[in-house]
Image (cartoon, grey):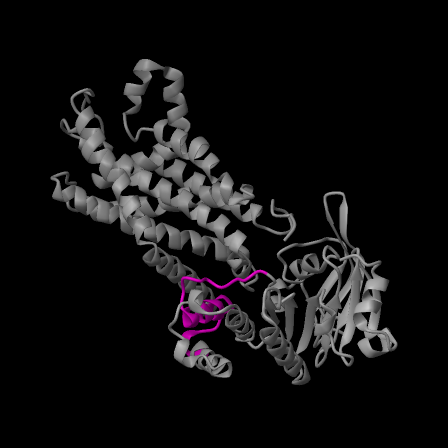
Amino acid sequence: MTGPNKTENADSGLSVRNVTFRYGAKVALDNLSLDVRAGAFTALLGPNGAGKSTLIALLTRLLVTREGRIVICGHDLARTPRAALTRLGVVFQQPTLDLNLSVRQNLAYFAALHGLSPAQMAPRIDAALDRLGMRERADEKARDLNGGHRRRMELARALLHDPKVLLLDEPTVGLDAAARRSITDHVHDLALQGLCVLWTTHLTDEVRDEDRLLVLHRGRIVAAGITGDIRQGAPLSDWFLKRTGGAE
Amino acid sequence: MNGYWGVSRAIIAREFLRFVHQRERFFAALVRPLVWLLVFASGFRAALGLSIIPPYQTYITYETYIMPGLCAMMLLFNGMQSSLSLVYDREMGSMRLLLTSPFPRWWLLVSRLAGATAISILQVYVFLAIAALFGIVMPPLGYAAVLPALALGGMMLGALGLLLSSFIRQLENFAGIMNFVIFPMFFLSSALYPLWKMAESSSLLRDICAGNPFTHVVELIRFSLYLQVDWGALAWVATSALVFTALAVWAYDPARGLNRRKP
């Protein structure tokens, strides 16, 4: 696994090196570097305005910066965006379903956007619907689903093209406690199965002690490690508030 | 290459599904030119005298004269409607889904343009059929010959809409498009009156109309309906289509374009 666009440690994960991004004069990300490994649930914890969504936009190439380098599964996002994006699954903070289309139509549209042929996509969509327990609701409009089901469907959709890296930008926003728990558990299971997961949140109760934790504050990583080791016995929420100056 | 066609097919199919779900949009798109044709044109036919000008070989009614302009008007409104839905998509998040596809962005955007244009053409043909029911008919082969002109004109006006959508930050600003783009483009063109008629009142206005790309869409359609090619108009429309598309793709390029704002 060598080549001009490979890096030393990111053949199966995500690597960000010295990335800086500005909105005009305002620095949103300041010389940011981080690694997200395959087979691990990595939580990017940060208060509102820390730069989480900007980072997700850069990782998905909705925004581009010339300062720094992003490598997804060994592929440089700036030099080989197609190879990099093919390996990426994303659940955005903002819902991205077309509410006027049916569940199946939404899934098929996304699968085609990722280059799957009708023959390839049909079994994957059926399998995704079965996993969600939604096969019988496949022809219902997305508008008729509740918030939890819509989110689960977006997650299933993000996995249709078999990505190696899964990004989730505050995916539980607006969900009730049961739906939050269900999605959090499901994504932890996916990480255990070998997926590289980066989960951004400002909610400390979504992070487990065994998770890798990155704390983002004012565009910089201010702490990194295994959550249980980092918090050193203190409740994570207290530790986080103290570390980020109570900014929320 | 299969993946490229697959993604285009999916984007175009989505445009059609969305169109099917918005039946009121279809009727609004039809009612507008029909009102112009059956009310406005009937009222003006007595007031406006038209000489014989190419491609016409005899005197024509005013209704016949404004048919190409009304077809182009449908393309114009649909192009702008498409830009409105792009802004809506951006606000609703579905634009992100499109733009994070691994396929080249220019291909995704051109596919979307093609989908919007296909819907416009469908509407134009329904309008032509209704007009025929009222006795306003074109040469039979003209209905087929006009298809490439409609496609090129639709792509050009759709690309303009795409470009404009990259400037519009919020849905509420769309009214500005109506005031500053659609109306000037439509009225400062040969859609409602020939350029020589315009020159009678002001040569400056006539020059402005002659430089308006929409005028050339109208003329391209007019000549095609009569099985002729207006090469000047074709060059204008093709060049404008390329320029608008290139600018729109540039504007949507995250490295260079206008979208460098908070996600």
Give left or right: position of B199 versus A6: left
Lateral position of residue A73 relative to residue A135, left or right: right
Residue B228 visible in the displayed image: no
Q: Position of residue A192 (x, y in %)?
A: 68, 84
Extreme-top residue of the structure? B201
Where is residue B83? Give x, y as percent: 45, 46
A113 falls in the magenta region: yes
Residue displayed at 33% across by 52% down: B119
From the viewer's side, name the closer residue of B123 and B29: B29
Asked if residue A110 lies in the magenta stretch, the reply is yes
Compared with B50, A199 (above or below) is below
Picture layout, residue B44 above or below residue A112: above
Residue A13: percent from the left, percent from the top? 71, 74
Closer to the camera, A100 or A125?
A100
Instruction: State which region is magenta.
Output: A94-120
Q: Is residue A10 left or right of residue B149?
A: right
Q: Determine if residue B96 is in view.
A: yes
Question: Quick one: A235 or B208, which is closer to the camera?
Answer: A235
Q: Judge by depth and name the residue closer to the eye, B239 or B138.
A: B138
